[in-house]
Structure formats: C-alpha cells, structure tokens
Amino acid sequence: MVQRKVEEEEEGVRVGKDKNKIKYKSIEQILKIEERDDMLEQLVLYAVRNNNCSKVKDIVDLLMSNDLIKTRLSSPSSSTIDDILDAVRRLAHKKAIMLYNSSITSFKDYLKNMYLSMTLWITAIVTAVTILTIYVLPDAIPWSIVRIVVGGAFVLFIPGYALVQLLFPSREMDVIERVALSIGLSLAVVPLTGFLLNYSPWGIRLDPIVASVSALSIILAFASVYRAYMMNVKTVRGEEEDED
C-alpha cells in the first residue's frame, strides 16, 4: 500500500480535456467551496495549471506546504495526502488531467514495473502454475483441488482478462465490470479456440488445449501491456487528441 502511494506520487501529470471547467484565480477562492471533494479537485487543478506541477508528488508537496489549505482541511497529514491522491484519481477518471509514468524510458523498463505490467505478470504466473498442477503435481487430494481451482481461473478468467485489458487499457472501468466482462469473454474465447482445434491436425486433446490457451493468453497480455506503454509514451510527448 505504501509502495503504491509512492508510485502514485511519482506519476507525471498533464492538463486534460477540461475546457469547460470553472478556472479559479486564487487558492482563497477555492477554499470557499463547501464540498470537500470538489474543493480538493479544484486545488489539484489549480496546482497543475498555475504552478506547473508536472508530478503528483509536486502537487502533494505544494498543497501540504500551504498553511491555509492545512487549516481548511483540518485533518491529519496522512489523511490529507490520501484525500489529495483520491482527488487526483477522480480527476484522471473524468479526464480533467492525464496521468503518466515519467520515469519509464523504454518498454523494457515498463515490463520490469510489476504494477504497470500487472496483466502480463498475472497471466504468466497463472499459466505457469496451471501447467505445473497439470503435469507435475500428483492427482491425489489436496493437489487435485488446487488443480481444479487454478485450472478454473486459467480457463474461465485469464483469456478474457487479457483481452479486456487490451481492449480497455484505461482505468475507467471498475473492477466488478472488468471481472464480469473477463469471465464472459473467456466463455467465448475458449470454446472458439476448441472449435478451431477441432479442425486442426492436433484435435481437441489436453496438450493442444493447454498450449493454445496459454499462448493466446500470453500474447493478448503482452499486447495489452505494449498498448498501455504506447499510451504512456504519447501522453508524455503531449500527443493526446483534443475534443472539439
């Protein structure tokens, strides 16, 4: 949790598509807003626009160093920082600001960051554990139960999860929606894979099915991570498209 907070504070920030938002001229005006969440969001936007804060850490440091803001929020420092980070995430969800990882300079670095390339790591780990339970572990209990659980996740979740991450790389979709869509797409992708194998020289057998689903899942996961990396690169370069 602490590590994730540090990573969030190191993320870069760019102004997004918020042309119709009210632009406050001073912090004093913003502090008059009664709704706490709205006030924090406007403070974050003010820091990005008027103080050229290019990282989330810069925003946190700027707002936490202002005595007027600390007095108005009147909460412990740790809680205030969490509230600021929550405001940043909400603004990113609304596309009022755009977040990117400014420390990533290559796709290799992106892959090494387990949080950013989580899709590929999860897919690879579940695939490896599934192969291990099928071909190495004995059939006796409790290993057979482990095989059922891991195999179920491998077939009913992982292929769809990798595909969802590829099709919807942004964080706009919540966890429940992603899980539901992942299961639904897995139920479509795996039978389609079996259908294609049925008309191939290998047929529908255990080894071809495991190999096909494994390869498909890893390819989709790798493609999703690469797409997310390219989106990060475009954001760093300021190549996002403006809406009319």
Image (cartoon, rainbow, N blue to C red):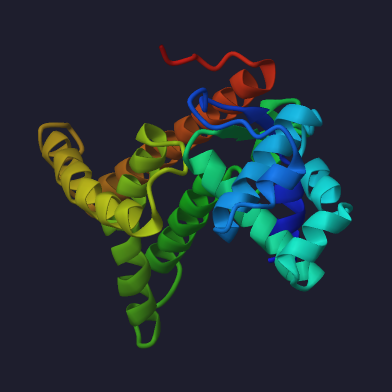
Say if 219 sits above or below 238 in the image.
below
Residue depicted at 50% across the width and 50% down the height: 124
Q: Quadrant of the N terminus?
A: bottom right
For the point 40% across and 81% down, which residue is it? Answer: 143
Q: Percent x, y for residue 156?
A: 26, 57
Image coords of residue 192 (percent x, y): 15, 39
Q: Is residue 156 above or below residue 133?
A: above
Frontmost residue, 130 versus 26: 26
Quadrant of the image occupied by residue 58: top right
Q: Which residue corresponds to the image point at 24% horizontal and 49% vertical from the top-left? A: 186
Q: Identify which residue, 106 or 136, lies in the foreground.
A: 106
In the drawing, does residue 184 fall left or right of residue 125? left
Q: Residue at x 38, y 47 (%)?
A: 173
* 175 relative position to 119: left or right: left
Tell me, yes or no, if residue 139 can be seen here: no
Quadrant housing residue 236? top right
> Which quadrant of the rendered structure holds the C terminus?
top left
Can residue 135 be seen here? The reply is yes
